[in-house]
Image (tube, rainbow, N blue to C red):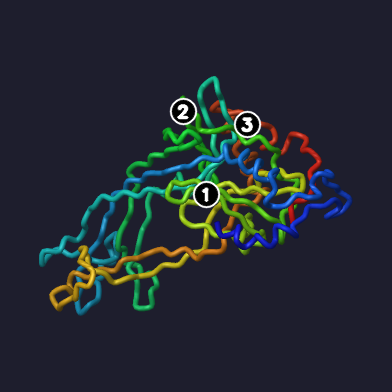
Amino acid sequence: MRFITKLIYLGCVLVLFAGCAGNKSAPEKSADLTLFSSEIRKEIKNVSSTVVGITCDIRYEIQKFNYEQVNGEFVPDPDGPLKYKLASHNGVDGMVIEADEKSLSGGGLIINTDPANSRYTILTSNHLVAPEDTTEVYYLDSEGQNTDALFARYIVKSVDIWVRGETNWRAEAKLLISYASDDLAIIESQTSYLLGREYPNPMSYNLNLSWGDWVFLFGFPKGIKQLTGGWVSESPYPNTLTVDAVVRFGFSGGSVFALTNDAKLLFVGVIKSVPRTTLDLIAPATNLPSGYRLGSDDINDLIVKREIVVEYGTAYFVNPKALLRFFNANRNVLETVGTNLHPKYYGESSPPKLVDPLR
């Protein structure tokens, strides 16, 4: 992992010592603690068993629209629902209906277990498990901006959520709570398979995460559990913090843990997003062999493909205050369906005296 190579030299100087902020003090044993100590490695394994992989299989109906054109311009239809007249001649269908499937992967944290009913309650990202019912894509103008001409409409027909835990067995899950405002969700899986154990440590509501704090992040790119880490900084987006970790697709919903001076990893957030850009590529509609030289007859078969490219080095995660607000806003819903979370999630249990996060 990239952060290890960066921190080989930092490990010797990141010594945890008493009195790093205010009048709080850390246990004496932490005087020789570094990021690579056996205590921290043990704690990483401890929380790793509470992190699960999530896969969301989505099936769409795609409606694509072709419009009549005169001199290269769409023919207006002011009274029609699409604003332009659909094509109806020359062998071109005005609306083409296709089917498509997409599979998303990410992570989640087990926040409650009910052994009597073989039930697991898991916190994750909303966009991972609750896609919008309908997404519309518009034609672009010469400057790459959206026009008012609808190109395609993606309609979700079905969503299947799967959870994979410690034993690598895959269990089906259902959506309990969708909270789009902070991109948080809770799912539930009832299975006889062992998915993992409930997060055992205190919540981090009394930690003041800020510039220079170190955090670990779990994700599941391509369905494989991975660990990375980075330094925290402020975020330009509300209710989030920034971390300079190398994450990619598959880290959505992943858990973020802050390392404290007493070698504990406290849950501090859920990975929300990474910066990304889009590339529009002109490509043939069918697969052609490498080195194939396009001829004039191939021009009509060219299509535009849009690829999403991750800008590595930055990620955003939902901060502890937003987590507390989320749990309290949805407490009644959870208790109505018989899910009783530990009082720590609602900020009610007396938190232990915690030292400051590692800086």
| Disc assigned to residue 226 | 1
Q: Position of residue 92 (x, y in %)?
A: 15, 64
The amino acid type, in three-letter code, at marker 3 is: Leu
Q: Position of residue 235 (x, y in %)?
A: 63, 62
**Residue 150 or residue 248, whichever sits in front:** 248
Q: CA distance from mark 1 to mark 2?
A: 22 Å
Image: 289 above or below 198: below
Image: 151 above or below 131: below
Q: CA distance from mark 2 to mark 3?
A: 21 Å
Q: Position of residue 298 (x, y in %)?
A: 16, 73
The amino acid type, in three-letter code, at marker 2 is: Tyr
Q: Crowdedness of circle 3 by 10 Å Cα count: few (<14), some, many (20+)?
A: some
Indicate which disc, 2 or 3, sits on the residue closer to the N terminus: 2
Which residue is label 2 attached to? 193
Q: CA distance from mark 1 to mark 3?
A: 27 Å
Determine the residue positioned at 49% across, 36% down: 165
Which residue is label 3 attached to? 341
Q: Position of residue 162 (x, y in %)?
A: 42, 38
The amino acid type, in three-letter code, at marker 1 is: Gln
Q: Secondary structure at mark 3?
A: loop
Quadrant including the N terminus: bottom right
Displayed quadrant of residue 303: bottom left
Q: Crowdedness of circle 2 by 10 Å Cα count: few (<14), some, many (20+)?
A: some
Q: Residue furthest left?
A: 90
Residues tagged 2 and 3 counted as in contact (Cβ below 8 A):
no
Determine the residue positioned at 41% across, 63% down: 308
Q: Nearer the viewer, mark 1 or mark 2?
A: 1
Q: Secondary structure at mark 1?
A: strand
